[in-house]
């Protein structure tokens, strides 16, 4: 008997749009389910609050942009982009990269296509702004997401940020030329 192929992800039947300030309480709930200590399995409140503060600051600055995936009844996910720092820039192949940051999707909706839709819209927005490449990294706490990044169309592992999240906590880096 032939093994069954994995189920195809659903097409996302929602909306991807820019983050608004009134979204932050629902985004906090997404982060509470995604920013989890791998040992205690508890939310990392300080990190969640820092991400939310960065999101608040993005409303008055061009340094970062965030998008949300939503259905009429709730926000399912969030993603951001910012200019990459020196370490991430070293992995870029083009002169105008943007870094994908803070991609989180509610665990019970991960196969619904929200994550890949968020990335696709982020890529389009990046191109509209004149960026030529997306780079991203993911620490060991999010090891389960690595397969997602490996399977994103056009993304390739570009290297590893050694000890990026502390001693022994290396982060693979992916990139995609747009």
Image (cartoon, rainbow, N blue to C red):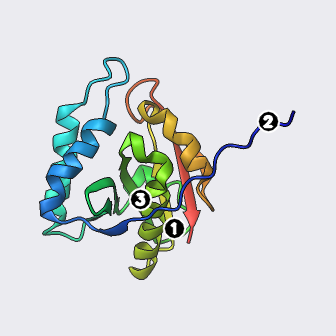
- Looking at the image, residue 144 sits to the left or right of residue 15; the answer is right
Query: Which mark sits nearer the N-terminus, 3 or 1?
Result: 3
**Where is mark 1, residue-wise?**
133
Q: CA distance from mark 2 to mark 3?
A: 38 Å
* Residue extending farthest right: 1
Q: At which x and y percent is residue 9? A: 57, 53
- Looking at the image, residue 164 sits to the left or right of residue 24; the answer is right
Q: Quadrant for the N terminus, please.
A: top right
Labels 3 & 1 near each other (Cβ < 8 A): no
Query: Which mark sits nearer the N-terminus, 2 or 1?
Result: 2
Q: At which x and y percent is residue 13? A: 43, 64
Labels 2 & 3 near each other (Cβ < 8 A): no
Can residue 20 be seen at all in this image of the molecule? yes
Q: At which x and y percent is residue 65? A: 28, 66
Query: Which mark sits nearer the N-terminus, 2 or 3?
Result: 2
- Looking at the image, residue 85 sits to the left or right of residue 25; the answer is right
Q: CA distance from mark 3 to mark 1?
A: 8 Å
Q: Eyeballing the image, is 138 above or below 27?
A: above
**Where is mark 2, residue-wise?**
3
How busy is the neighbourhood of tag 1: few (under 14 within 10 Å), some, or many (20 plus)?
A: many
- Of circles 2 and 3, which is in front? 2
**Where is mark 3, residue-wise?**
99
Q: Eyeballing the image, is 129 above or below 87?
A: below
Q: Quadrant for the C terminus, please.
A: bottom right
Number of the label disc, if any, that sits on residue 29: none
- Of circles 2 and 1, which is in front? 2
Q: At which x and y percent is residue 90? A: 50, 54
Q: Secondary structure at mark 1?
A: strand
- Looking at the image, residue 164 sits to the left or right of residue 63; the answer is right
Please name the residue shown 50% across and 41% down the image. 145
């Amino acid at each position: 008997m032939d093994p069954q192929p994995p189920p195809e992800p659903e097409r996302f039947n929602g909306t991807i749009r820019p983050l608004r300030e009134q979204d932050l309480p629902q985004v906090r709930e997404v982060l509470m389910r995604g920013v989890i200590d791998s040992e205690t399995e508890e939310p990392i409140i300080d990190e969640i609050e820092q991400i939310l503060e960065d999101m608040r600051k993005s409303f008055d600055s061009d340094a970062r942009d965030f998008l949300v995936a939503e259905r009429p009844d709730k926000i399912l996910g969030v993603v951001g982009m910012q200019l990459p720092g020196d370490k991430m820039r070293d992995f870029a192949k083009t002169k105008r990269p943007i870094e994908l940051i803070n991609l989180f999707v509610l665990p019970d909706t991960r196969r619904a296509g929200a994550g890949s839709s968020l990335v696709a819209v982020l890529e389009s927005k990046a191109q509209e702004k004149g960026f030529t490449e997306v780079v991203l990294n993911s620490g060991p706490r999010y090891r389960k997401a690595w397969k997602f990044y490996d399977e994103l169309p056009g993304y390739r592992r570009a290297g590893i940020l050694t000890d990026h999240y502390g001693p022994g906590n290396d982060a693979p880096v992916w990139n995609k030329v747009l």
